[in-house]
Amino acid sequence: MNKTIRGCAMGLAIVLFAGGSMAQEIVGERQWKAQDVVGEWRANTPQGELVIVLTMENDGKLAGTMAGGWWAGVNKLSEVGFVDGKLSVANVFEFNGEELTIWYDGDLNGNAIDGVLKTGDFGVFPLIVSRREPRPISVEGEWQVSFEGRQGTRNATLKITKDTYGKLAGTWATQRGESALLNLRVAGGVLLFTRHIEFNENSMDFNYTATVEGDSIVGTIASERFGERPFKGRRTSVASRTGVAYSTSSTSDASADFTMALGKWGFAMQTASGPREIQIELVEQDGQIAGTWAGPEGNAPIENATYYDGNLAFDINIDTSVGPFTLTFEAKVFKNSFYGKLITQTTRGGRSR
Protein backbone atom coordinates (compact mmCIF):
# COMPACT_ATOMS: atom_id res chain seq x y z
CA MET A 1 0.00 0.00 0.00
CA ASN A 2 1.23 3.47 -0.81
CA LYS A 3 1.77 5.29 2.47
CA THR A 4 1.10 8.66 0.86
CA ILE A 5 -1.71 10.49 2.69
CA ARG A 6 -2.75 7.11 4.05
CA GLY A 7 -4.96 8.37 6.86
CA CYS A 8 -6.99 10.65 4.60
CA ALA A 9 -7.23 7.89 2.04
CA MET A 10 -8.62 5.38 4.47
CA GLY A 11 -11.21 7.82 5.75
CA LEU A 12 -12.31 8.62 2.23
CA ALA A 13 -12.22 5.02 1.11
CA ILE A 14 -14.82 4.05 3.72
CA VAL A 15 -17.22 6.60 2.26
CA LEU A 16 -16.30 5.85 -1.36
CA PHE A 17 -16.93 2.16 -1.27
CA ALA A 18 -20.20 2.77 0.50
CA GLY A 19 -21.46 5.24 -2.09
CA GLY A 20 -19.13 4.95 -5.13
CA SER A 21 -18.17 8.61 -5.43
CA MET A 22 -18.65 11.93 -3.73
CA ALA A 23 -17.91 15.62 -4.04
CA GLN A 24 -17.39 18.26 -1.39
CA GLU A 25 -17.05 22.01 -1.53
CA ILE A 26 -13.69 23.39 -0.48
CA VAL A 27 -12.40 26.87 0.35
CA GLY A 28 -8.70 27.55 0.67
CA GLU A 29 -6.33 30.39 1.45
CA ARG A 30 -2.95 31.24 0.04
CA GLN A 31 -0.03 30.73 2.41
CA TRP A 32 2.46 33.44 1.49
CA LYS A 33 6.19 33.08 2.05
CA ALA A 34 9.02 35.59 1.69
CA GLN A 35 10.63 33.50 -1.06
CA ASP A 36 7.73 34.45 -3.35
CA VAL A 37 9.20 37.92 -3.99
CA VAL A 38 12.89 37.03 -4.17
CA GLY A 39 14.35 38.04 -7.52
CA GLU A 40 15.00 40.98 -9.80
CA TRP A 41 12.12 43.35 -10.61
CA ARG A 42 12.15 46.08 -13.26
CA ALA A 43 9.95 48.92 -14.47
CA ASN A 44 10.28 51.92 -16.79
CA THR A 45 9.73 55.36 -15.25
CA PRO A 46 9.98 58.90 -16.69
CA GLN A 47 13.37 59.12 -14.95
CA GLY A 48 14.65 55.87 -16.44
CA GLU A 49 14.55 52.19 -15.60
CA LEU A 50 13.91 51.25 -11.96
CA VAL A 51 15.47 48.02 -10.70
CA ILE A 52 14.60 46.38 -7.38
CA VAL A 53 16.57 43.28 -6.36
CA LEU A 54 15.23 41.29 -3.40
CA THR A 55 17.26 38.57 -1.66
CA MET A 56 16.89 36.25 1.31
CA GLU A 57 19.40 36.59 4.13
CA ASN A 58 20.75 33.66 6.16
CA ASP A 59 18.36 34.55 8.98
CA GLY A 60 15.39 34.21 6.65
CA LYS A 61 14.73 37.95 6.40
CA LEU A 62 14.36 39.85 3.16
CA ALA A 63 16.92 42.42 2.01
CA GLY A 64 17.57 44.18 -1.25
CA THR A 65 18.71 47.09 -3.35
CA MET A 66 17.10 49.74 -5.54
CA ALA A 67 18.74 51.36 -8.56
CA GLY A 68 17.66 53.79 -11.25
CA GLY A 69 15.45 56.82 -11.28
CA TRP A 70 17.05 60.20 -10.63
CA TRP A 71 19.51 59.04 -7.95
CA ALA A 72 22.96 57.71 -8.72
CA GLY A 73 24.25 54.21 -8.04
CA VAL A 74 22.73 51.26 -6.28
CA ASN A 75 21.24 51.85 -2.83
CA LYS A 76 20.66 49.27 -0.14
CA LEU A 77 17.02 49.18 0.92
CA SER A 78 16.54 50.43 4.47
CA GLU A 79 13.26 48.53 4.91
CA VAL A 80 11.83 45.41 3.25
CA GLY A 81 8.55 43.84 4.28
CA PHE A 82 6.29 41.20 2.76
CA VAL A 83 3.04 40.28 4.50
CA ASP A 84 -0.03 38.57 3.01
CA GLY A 85 1.14 39.18 -0.55
CA LYS A 86 1.94 42.86 -0.01
CA LEU A 87 5.49 44.13 -0.55
CA SER A 88 6.76 47.30 1.09
CA VAL A 89 10.29 48.68 0.60
CA ALA A 90 12.01 51.94 1.49
CA ASN A 91 15.03 53.50 -0.19
CA VAL A 92 16.86 56.31 1.65
CA PHE A 93 19.33 58.37 -0.39
CA GLU A 94 20.80 61.83 -0.76
CA PHE A 95 19.58 64.21 -3.46
CA ASN A 96 21.00 67.73 -3.86
CA GLY A 97 22.41 67.55 -0.36
CA GLU A 98 19.14 66.42 1.23
CA GLU A 99 18.11 63.04 2.55
CA LEU A 100 15.07 61.68 0.74
CA THR A 101 13.08 58.49 1.06
CA ILE A 102 11.26 56.60 -1.66
CA TRP A 103 8.67 54.00 -0.71
CA TYR A 104 7.31 51.34 -3.00
CA ASP A 105 4.23 49.38 -1.91
CA GLY A 106 2.53 46.79 -4.08
CA ASP A 107 0.56 43.56 -4.34
CA LEU A 108 2.27 40.47 -5.75
CA ASN A 109 0.42 38.97 -8.70
CA GLY A 110 2.42 36.19 -10.33
CA ASN A 111 5.37 37.71 -12.14
CA ALA A 112 4.31 41.31 -11.49
CA ILE A 113 3.86 43.60 -8.51
CA ASP A 114 1.11 46.20 -8.89
CA GLY A 115 1.79 49.13 -6.62
CA VAL A 116 2.64 52.78 -6.11
CA LEU A 117 5.91 54.68 -5.83
CA LYS A 118 5.77 57.36 -3.15
CA THR A 119 8.41 60.07 -3.30
CA GLY A 120 7.53 62.44 -0.47
CA ASP A 121 7.04 65.96 -1.78
CA PHE A 122 7.29 64.72 -5.38
CA GLY A 123 3.99 62.81 -5.26
CA VAL A 124 2.59 59.31 -5.62
CA PHE A 125 2.83 57.40 -8.89
CA PRO A 126 1.27 54.05 -9.90
CA LEU A 127 4.00 51.61 -10.92
CA ILE A 128 3.99 47.94 -11.96
CA VAL A 129 7.31 46.10 -11.68
CA SER A 130 7.91 42.80 -13.46
CA ARG A 131 10.29 39.92 -12.95
CA ARG A 132 13.32 40.22 -15.16
CA GLU A 133 13.32 36.61 -16.34
CA PRO A 134 10.32 35.63 -18.49
CA ARG A 135 8.42 32.45 -17.79
CA PRO A 136 10.21 29.61 -19.62
CA ILE A 137 8.39 28.14 -22.59
CA SER A 138 7.39 24.49 -22.79
CA VAL A 139 8.42 22.79 -26.04
CA GLU A 140 8.08 19.11 -25.10
CA GLY A 141 5.46 17.02 -26.81
CA GLU A 142 4.32 16.00 -30.25
CA TRP A 143 3.67 18.70 -32.87
CA GLN A 144 1.91 18.40 -36.22
CA VAL A 145 3.45 20.96 -38.56
CA SER A 146 3.12 21.96 -42.20
CA PHE A 147 5.31 23.82 -44.68
CA GLU A 148 5.47 24.50 -48.41
CA GLY A 149 7.68 22.24 -50.50
CA ARG A 150 8.43 22.09 -54.20
CA GLN A 151 5.36 19.91 -54.71
CA GLY A 152 2.96 21.83 -52.48
CA THR A 153 2.11 21.63 -48.80
CA ARG A 154 3.97 18.99 -46.83
CA ASN A 155 3.28 17.69 -43.33
CA ALA A 156 5.67 16.57 -40.62
CA THR A 157 5.62 15.36 -37.04
CA LEU A 158 7.97 17.06 -34.61
CA LYS A 159 8.60 15.19 -31.34
CA ILE A 160 10.54 16.75 -28.45
CA THR A 161 11.36 15.17 -25.10
CA LYS A 162 13.29 16.28 -22.02
CA ASP A 163 15.19 13.99 -19.69
CA THR A 164 15.51 14.33 -15.92
CA TYR A 165 18.60 16.48 -16.37
CA GLY A 166 16.77 18.98 -18.57
CA LYS A 167 18.41 17.91 -21.84
CA LEU A 168 16.19 18.17 -24.92
CA ALA A 169 16.05 15.55 -27.69
CA GLY A 170 13.77 15.19 -30.67
CA THR A 171 12.93 13.89 -34.12
CA TRP A 172 11.40 15.25 -37.33
CA ALA A 173 9.37 12.72 -39.35
CA THR A 174 7.74 12.92 -42.78
CA GLN A 175 6.54 10.27 -45.22
CA ARG A 176 10.13 10.10 -46.46
CA GLY A 177 11.51 9.04 -43.09
CA GLU A 178 12.62 10.25 -39.69
CA SER A 179 15.74 12.15 -38.64
CA ALA A 180 17.15 13.19 -35.28
CA LEU A 181 17.34 16.84 -34.27
CA LEU A 182 20.78 18.31 -33.67
CA ASN A 183 21.77 21.15 -31.34
CA LEU A 184 18.21 21.32 -30.00
CA ARG A 185 17.83 24.15 -27.50
CA VAL A 186 15.73 27.07 -26.26
CA ALA A 187 17.54 30.42 -26.18
CA GLY A 188 15.95 33.77 -25.43
CA GLY A 189 12.47 32.28 -25.68
CA VAL A 190 13.21 30.87 -29.17
CA LEU A 191 13.33 27.19 -30.14
CA LEU A 192 16.34 26.29 -32.30
CA PHE A 193 17.50 23.04 -33.90
CA THR A 194 19.17 21.57 -36.99
CA ARG A 195 18.41 18.58 -39.21
CA HIS A 196 21.18 16.88 -41.19
CA ILE A 197 20.12 14.67 -44.08
CA GLU A 198 22.07 12.67 -46.67
CA PHE A 199 20.81 11.69 -50.11
CA ASN A 200 22.45 10.53 -53.38
CA GLU A 201 25.92 10.88 -51.82
CA ASN A 202 25.06 14.47 -50.92
CA SER A 203 24.23 16.06 -47.56
CA MET A 204 22.30 19.10 -46.44
CA ASP A 205 21.59 20.96 -43.21
CA PHE A 206 18.22 22.53 -42.40
CA ASN A 207 18.22 25.14 -39.62
CA TYR A 208 14.97 25.73 -37.73
CA THR A 209 14.00 28.81 -35.73
CA ALA A 210 10.60 28.96 -34.04
CA THR A 211 8.54 30.69 -31.40
CA VAL A 212 6.07 28.81 -29.21
CA GLU A 213 2.86 30.35 -27.85
CA GLY A 214 0.93 27.81 -25.84
CA ASP A 215 0.16 24.92 -28.20
CA SER A 216 1.02 26.86 -31.38
CA ILE A 217 4.40 26.96 -33.11
CA VAL A 218 5.49 29.30 -35.92
CA GLY A 219 8.93 29.44 -37.45
CA THR A 220 11.25 29.22 -40.46
CA ILE A 221 13.31 26.50 -42.14
CA ALA A 222 16.57 27.73 -43.69
CA SER A 223 18.95 25.88 -45.99
CA GLU A 224 21.56 26.86 -48.63
CA ARG A 225 19.71 25.06 -51.43
CA PHE A 226 16.10 26.10 -50.73
CA GLY A 227 16.57 29.38 -48.88
CA GLU A 228 14.12 30.24 -46.08
CA ARG A 229 10.60 28.86 -45.82
CA PRO A 230 7.94 29.35 -43.13
CA PHE A 231 6.33 26.53 -41.17
CA LYS A 232 3.60 26.38 -38.57
CA GLY A 233 1.88 23.79 -36.45
CA ARG A 234 0.08 22.79 -33.29
CA ARG A 235 0.94 20.59 -30.33
CA THR A 236 -1.23 17.48 -30.29
CA SER A 237 0.11 15.81 -27.14
CA VAL A 238 2.25 16.80 -24.18
CA ALA A 239 4.48 14.67 -21.98
CA SER A 240 3.26 14.92 -18.39
CA ARG A 241 5.46 14.75 -15.31
CA THR A 242 5.02 10.99 -15.21
CA GLY A 243 5.83 10.61 -18.89
CA VAL A 244 2.27 9.82 -20.00
CA ALA A 245 1.04 11.73 -23.04
CA TYR A 246 -2.34 13.43 -22.95
CA SER A 247 -4.23 15.05 -25.81
CA THR A 248 -4.71 18.80 -26.05
CA SER A 249 -7.92 20.32 -27.40
CA SER A 250 -8.47 23.42 -29.48
CA THR A 251 -9.88 25.18 -26.43
CA SER A 252 -6.81 24.63 -24.27
CA ASP A 253 -4.54 27.60 -23.67
CA ALA A 254 -1.16 26.58 -22.29
CA SER A 255 -0.01 30.18 -22.63
CA ALA A 256 -2.50 31.34 -19.97
CA ASP A 257 -0.64 33.04 -17.14
CA PHE A 258 -0.92 30.41 -14.42
CA THR A 259 1.56 32.20 -12.13
CA MET A 260 -1.53 33.44 -10.24
CA ALA A 261 -1.98 29.88 -8.98
CA LEU A 262 1.63 29.24 -7.94
CA GLY A 263 2.60 29.15 -4.29
CA LYS A 264 1.35 27.47 -1.12
CA TRP A 265 -2.32 26.96 -0.32
CA GLY A 266 -4.14 25.42 2.63
CA PHE A 267 -7.66 24.06 3.21
CA ALA A 268 -9.59 21.53 5.29
CA MET A 269 -10.79 18.30 3.65
CA GLN A 270 -13.71 16.43 5.22
CA THR A 271 -13.16 12.68 5.72
CA ALA A 272 -14.96 9.92 7.59
CA SER A 273 -12.43 10.48 10.38
CA GLY A 274 -13.14 14.22 10.54
CA PRO A 275 -11.56 17.28 8.93
CA ARG A 276 -7.95 17.01 7.75
CA GLU A 277 -5.70 19.97 7.05
CA ILE A 278 -4.24 19.83 3.54
CA GLN A 279 -1.45 21.89 2.03
CA ILE A 280 -0.89 22.31 -1.69
CA GLU A 281 2.33 23.72 -3.11
CA LEU A 282 2.26 24.59 -6.81
CA VAL A 283 5.43 25.37 -8.73
CA GLU A 284 6.39 25.96 -12.32
CA GLN A 285 8.21 23.12 -14.04
CA ASP A 286 9.19 23.33 -17.69
CA GLY A 287 6.50 25.91 -18.37
CA GLN A 288 3.74 23.84 -16.74
CA ILE A 289 2.18 23.45 -13.31
CA ALA A 290 3.63 20.80 -11.01
CA GLY A 291 3.52 20.39 -7.27
CA THR A 292 2.74 18.44 -4.14
CA TRP A 293 -0.33 17.60 -2.08
CA ALA A 294 0.58 17.26 1.61
CA GLY A 295 -1.51 15.82 4.42
CA PRO A 296 -0.73 14.71 7.99
CA GLU A 297 0.57 11.34 6.80
CA GLY A 298 2.70 12.38 3.82
CA ASN A 299 2.84 13.79 0.32
CA ALA A 300 1.54 12.90 -3.15
CA PRO A 301 2.47 14.41 -6.54
CA ILE A 302 -0.03 16.56 -8.39
CA GLU A 303 -0.90 15.15 -11.83
CA ASN A 304 -2.58 16.46 -14.99
CA ALA A 305 -2.62 20.05 -13.73
CA THR A 306 -4.37 22.63 -15.91
CA TYR A 307 -5.10 26.33 -15.50
CA TYR A 308 -7.38 28.37 -17.73
CA ASP A 309 -9.05 31.71 -17.10
CA GLY A 310 -8.50 31.46 -13.36
CA ASN A 311 -9.73 27.86 -13.10
CA LEU A 312 -7.28 25.36 -11.61
CA ALA A 313 -7.69 21.59 -11.85
CA PHE A 314 -5.50 18.59 -11.05
CA ASP A 315 -5.65 14.95 -9.94
CA ILE A 316 -4.22 13.01 -7.01
CA ASN A 317 -4.02 9.22 -7.39
CA ILE A 318 -4.00 7.21 -4.15
CA ASP A 319 -3.62 3.50 -3.41
CA THR A 320 -5.32 2.12 -0.29
CA SER A 321 -5.71 -1.34 1.24
CA VAL A 322 -9.22 -1.51 -0.24
CA GLY A 323 -8.28 -0.29 -3.70
CA PRO A 324 -7.13 2.75 -5.69
CA PHE A 325 -9.06 5.95 -6.18
CA THR A 326 -8.56 9.45 -7.53
CA LEU A 327 -9.12 12.87 -6.01
CA THR A 328 -9.93 15.54 -8.57
CA PHE A 329 -9.43 19.14 -7.48
CA GLU A 330 -11.35 21.88 -9.35
CA ALA A 331 -11.38 25.47 -8.11
CA LYS A 332 -11.56 29.11 -9.11
CA VAL A 333 -8.39 30.89 -8.00
CA PHE A 334 -8.40 34.44 -6.68
CA LYS A 335 -5.46 36.43 -5.37
CA ASN A 336 -5.47 35.10 -1.81
CA SER A 337 -8.09 32.35 -1.90
CA PHE A 338 -9.79 29.68 -3.97
CA TYR A 339 -13.28 28.22 -4.01
CA GLY A 340 -14.25 24.95 -5.65
CA LYS A 341 -14.85 21.26 -5.13
CA LEU A 342 -12.99 18.04 -4.45
CA ILE A 343 -14.35 15.02 -6.32
CA THR A 344 -13.49 11.45 -5.34
CA GLN A 345 -13.96 8.37 -7.47
CA THR A 346 -13.03 4.72 -7.09
CA THR A 347 -11.63 4.36 -10.60
CA ARG A 348 -8.10 5.58 -11.20
CA GLY A 349 -7.42 8.05 -13.97
CA GLY A 350 -8.94 11.43 -13.10
CA ARG A 351 -10.31 13.87 -15.63
CA SER A 352 -10.58 13.03 -19.31
CA ARG A 353 -8.19 14.98 -21.50
Image (cartoon, helix red, strand yellow):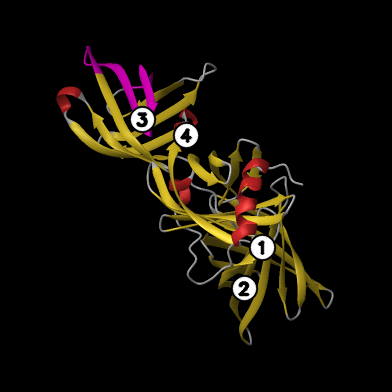
The answer to whether residue 92 is magenta is yes
Specify which label sits upstream in the sequence, 2 or 4: 4
Marks 4/3 in contact by CB < 8 Å: the verdict is no
Which residue does the image show at 62% across and 44% down from the upper left?
8
Residue where numbered disc 3 is placed: 87
Of labels 2 and 1, the one closer to you: 1
Q: Is residue 310 above or below residue 28?
A: below
User: Closer to the camera, 88 or 98?
Assistant: 88
Of labels 2 and 3, the one closer to you: 3
What amino acid is labelled 3 in the image?
Answer: Leu
* Residue 309 placement, left or right of 283: left
Q: How packed is label 4: few (under 14 Cα within 10 Å), some, or many (20 or more)? A: some
Q: Quadrant of residue 256?
A: bottom left
Q: Secondary structure at mark 4?
A: helix
> The magenta stretch spans which residues?
72-100
Q: How packed is label 2: few (under 14 Cα within 10 Å), some, or many (20 or more)? A: some
The image's mark for residue 45 is none
Q: Secondary structure at mark 2?
A: strand
What amino acid is labelled 2 in the image?
Answer: Gln
Residue where numbered disc 4 is placed: 36
Q: How packed is label 3: few (under 14 Cα within 10 Å), some, or many (20 or more)? A: some
Gap between marks 4 and 3, in whole Å? 10 Å
Residue 353 screen position, x and y as percent: 58, 67
Residue 316 shows in the view:
no
Residue where numbered disc 2 is placed: 144
Residue where numbered disc 1 is placed: 347
The answer to whether residue 154 is magenta is no
What amino acid is labelled 1 in the image?
Answer: Thr
